[in-house]
Structure formats: C-alpha cells, structure tokens
Image (cartoon, helix red, strand yellow):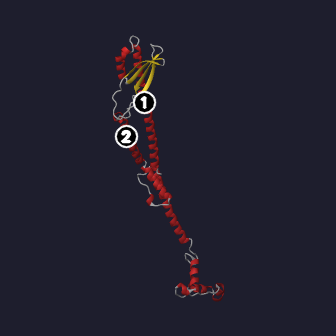
Amino acid sequence: MRLTTKFSAFVTLLTGLTIFVTLLGCSLSFYNAIQYKFSHRVQAVATAIDTHLVSNDFSALRPQITELMMSADIVRVDLLHGDKQVYTLARNGSYRPVGTSDLFRELSVPLIKHPGMSLRLVYQDPMGNYFHSLMTTAPLTGAIGFIILMLFLAVRWLQRQLAGQELLETRATRILNGERGSNVLGTIYEWPPRTSSALDTLLREIQNAREQHSRLDTLIRSYAAQDMKTGLNNRLFFDNQLATLLEDQEKVGTHGIVMMIRLPDFNMLSDTWGTARLKNSSSL
C-alpha cells in the first residue's frame, strides 16, 4: 500500500470517528437540554396551579388550567391526594401531521402549598416529531455535507503534498530492483529535495566508479598479461594454437608451413667460431 493511501485512510478514519463522536455528543446534549427545559416548563405550570388552588377550587380553575395546558402541550392533568385521584382535566392534542404519532411523557409534581397532594401531568414529548421534520434537520444535514466536502478537499491536498514522496519511493524501488544509469535519476518534483539530490549524487559516483573500474580492468588485461619473451599478450594462447596446428591440421582449417630451427649451444659456437663472428651471425 502506498504512503498516500495509508495516510489518507488514516486521516479519513480519524475524521470520520471525530464527526461521529461529535454528532453523537451534540445530539445527546441537544436532546437532554430540550427535555430538561420542557420539564421545567411543566413544573412551572404545576407551581402556578398550586398557587391558584389556594384561593379557588379546581373545577373553577378549568379555563385557566386549559390555557396553561395549551402553552406547555399538556394533554391531561390529574390532581391526586396520595394515590387517589381527586380531579382530572384532559384536552385534545394539538395538530398532528399525517404519518406521525405523538409520544407522551409523564411528570408528577408534589404541591408545596397542599401537603399530601400532587399533580400528575401528561405532556407531549417535544422531541417526538423533531427528527421527522426536514426543515429542522436541514442545518444538521448541511453541516454534515460541508464536513464531507472539506474532508474530500483535505485528502486531495494531502495527496498532492505527498506525491513527491511517492515518486522518491518508486525510484528507490527501481534502484533496489537493479536498475542503474540515467533512467533512475530523480526529478524536481521529488520530496524531500535534499534526499533526492543525495541519491542522484550517489548514483553518479557509482556510475563513474564502474566506468573507472572498467577502464582499469582493460588496462590490466592489456599490460599485465603481456609475455616479456615473445611480446604476445598471452604466450599460453600462442602455444595452444601452435600445438593445434601441428597435431590436427585438417580439422582446424588453417593452411601454412611452420619452420622450426634449432640452434646449437652458444658457448660451443663461441669456442668454435669466435665471439665476433657469433655476434655478427646473431644480428643477421
């Protein structure tokens, strides 16, 4: 797997986890905040009813209680004395779109000014139809889309930034596979540039060393193998060729005459002819 692919996958994973945790935390915080705020509104209604019951009867307060119930989306109010129901008041629910259903919550509030009595209030869940509305979730959808777009642009920018490292890694792989010469020299797009330049310098030095080694090897073969007696580059090769010509002339396919002259001992000739005459004959 390439470096860019690894890093992009890692960044995408971290960003996705961050988005998921952020959305989950925001959703829970929003849900709890709405529930907490609405429960306080219902408790405020119960406190108002408790205050009015000091001077009025529950049945006489039905119009006022109905108005309070409508403002807080309360559908039923039960006045309890211990576990016994004393009064009850219910109203029809508010407008509900087709295809949706109401969710209800229940809250019991003890009456401070009437010890032993309590109010049980049943109200609509404010979050029941919130997630079914397109308009209410449009900002959240837009935020998610914006994050995805920014993530895509960030990955593209990251790939462009790491393209030079990919080129350098590809060239290093080619060098490890045995390629040499000008084909594996770097370009200006490789990153980091100093590493690329150092690699090019080493490749040039290796190429120069190979050329010098080749020239030195040729020079050694040219002079070190020269026979001092015959002047030939390889006396053994000459002996082998001569033996081949003498032993098997038909198979070699080379025709000619080889004359071999055997000279007597120079000391004996010197005693017989004299030194001056021997030197004259040798020069001929």
Disc 1 from disc 2: Cα separation: 22 Å
User: Looking at the image, which residue is at 46% across and 55% down?
Assistant: 170
Front residue (pair 114, 41):
114
Q: Nearer the viewer, residue 94 or 191?
A: 94
Q: What residue is rendered at 54% in x and 69% in y?
A: 220
Say what amino acid the circle numbered 2 marks: Gly
**Considering depth in this image, is 11 or 159 the residue closer to the camera?**
11
In the image shown, does 34 or 217 lie closer to the viewer?
A: 34
Do the numbered discs 1 and 2 sit on residues whose CB atoms are within 8 Å? no
In the picture as drawn, the residue positioned furthest to the top comes out as 55
Q: How many marks?
A: 2
- Residue pointed to by mark 1: 31
Q: Position of residue 281 (x, y in %)?
A: 58, 86
Q: Which residue is mark 2?
A: 145
- Relative vertical location of residue 207 with respect to residue 138 in this rendering, above or below: below
Residue 24, x across and y down, in percent: 44, 35
Quarter the C terminus occupies:
bottom right
Comparing marks 1 and 2, which lies closer to the viewer? 1
Q: Secondary structure at mark 1?
A: helix
Q: Identify whether 51 is placed above or below 161.
A: above
Identify the amino acid type marked 1.
Tyr
Rate crowding at label 2 as few (under 14), some (14 to 19) or many (20 or more) other CA atoms within 10 Å: few
Q: Give coordinates of residue 99: x percent, y percent.
A: 35, 35
Find residue 41 and name its label. none
Residue 12 in percent (x, y) is at 44, 43
Residue 261 falls left or right of residue 147: right
Q: Please name the residue shown 52% across and 66% down the image.
A: 216
Q: First in sequence: mark 1 or mark 2? A: 1
Q: Residue at x 44, y 51 (%)?
A: 166
Q: Is residue 200 visible?
A: no
